[in-house]
Image (cartoon, rainbow, N blue to C red):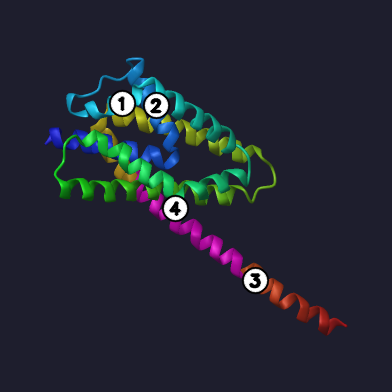
């Protein structure tokens, strides 16, 4: 049972981390492997490529750019919008490497499920940022971004060091992400409707006053 749950937990943890930052998940994982902070299980040999200097260099540069963009209001939401496709696809490909050799059917199912988990986390992150960006001051945006960076590091650490824990936490994280996204989306739609009603009734009231 553990032989199956371990790789699944590692894969789910990496998928969740990729929803927060794909480049960060690749870089932090590769750095941990490169410096010997994490001892990869024999079945996770495919993840060793993340420690390659070229992969570390490219992912590190992209993560640095994202780290800065993520601290700027509006820019962070534009960045999230661009990565709505990139993160789920990249997250599924990254996370599936923890599963080892799979049959074609299992591989397709794994990619779909892991991509869905990454998308759920990404959607929660993006909608949360949209809500935070309504605040006129930048401090809250920076604090939320730094919190996400911390959660990213924790997710990668759990995925590679404690995959069984990552399995349980990952399932909870995906569930919470879906609920949070739906709740924030509902609030956003309600706010847009109120704004639309206000714009529609504004001119007519002004005309009546004259």
Q: Main secondary structure of the magenta part?
A: helix
- Residue sitting at 69 percent across and 42 percent down? 137
SS label for mark 4: helix
Instruction: Read off the residue under disc 4.
Output: 180
Q: Horizontally, is 105 left or right of 17 in the view?
A: left
Q: Give residue 60's position: percent from left, percent from top.
A: 47, 26
Choose mark 3 or mark 2, whichever is in front.
2
Quarter holding the C terminus? bottom right
> Which element carries disc 2, helix, strand or loop?
helix
Q: Is 174 covered by the magenta stretch? A: yes
- For marks 2 and 4 on the same chain, the one whose residue lies earlier in the sequence: 2
Label located before the other in sequence (4 or 3): 4
Real-space Cα distance between discs 4 and 3?
A: 24 Å
Give the residue pinned by disc 2: 55
Callouts 1 and 3 close, C-beta under 8 Å: no
Which residue in the protein does label 3 denote? 196
Q: Identify residue for label 1.
A: 49
Label 2 Cα neighbours within 10 Å, binned few <14 / some 14-19 / many ≥20: some
Q: Residues within 10 Å of mark 4 (few under 14, many from 20)?
A: some
């Amino acid at each position: 049972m553990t032989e199956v749950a371990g790789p699944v937990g590692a894969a789910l943890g990496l998928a969740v981390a990729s929803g927060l930052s794909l480049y960060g998940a690749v870089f932090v994982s590769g750095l941990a492997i490169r410096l010997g902070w994490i001892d990869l299980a024999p079945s996770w040999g495919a993840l060793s490529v993340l420690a390659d200097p070229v992969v570390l260099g490219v992912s590190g540069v992209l993560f640095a750019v994202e780290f800065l963009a993520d601290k700027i209001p509006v820019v962070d939401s534009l960045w999230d919008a661009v990565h709505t496709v990139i993160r789920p696809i990249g997250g599924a490909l990254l996370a599936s490497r923890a599963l080892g050799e799979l049959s074609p059917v299992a591989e397709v199912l794994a990619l779909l499920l892991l991509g869905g988990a990454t998308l759920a986390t990404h959607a929660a992150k993006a909608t949360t940022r949209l809500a935070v960006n309504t605040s006129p001051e930048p401090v809250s945006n920076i604090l939320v971004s730094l919190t996400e960076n911390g959660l990213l590091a924790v997710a990668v650490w759990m995925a590679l060091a404690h995959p069984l824990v990552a399995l349980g936490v990952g399932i909870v994280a995906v569930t919470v992400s879906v609920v949070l996204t739906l709740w924030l989306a509902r609030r956003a739609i309600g706010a847009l409707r109120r704004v639309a009603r206000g714009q529609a009734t504004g001119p007519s009231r002004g005309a009546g006053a004259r």
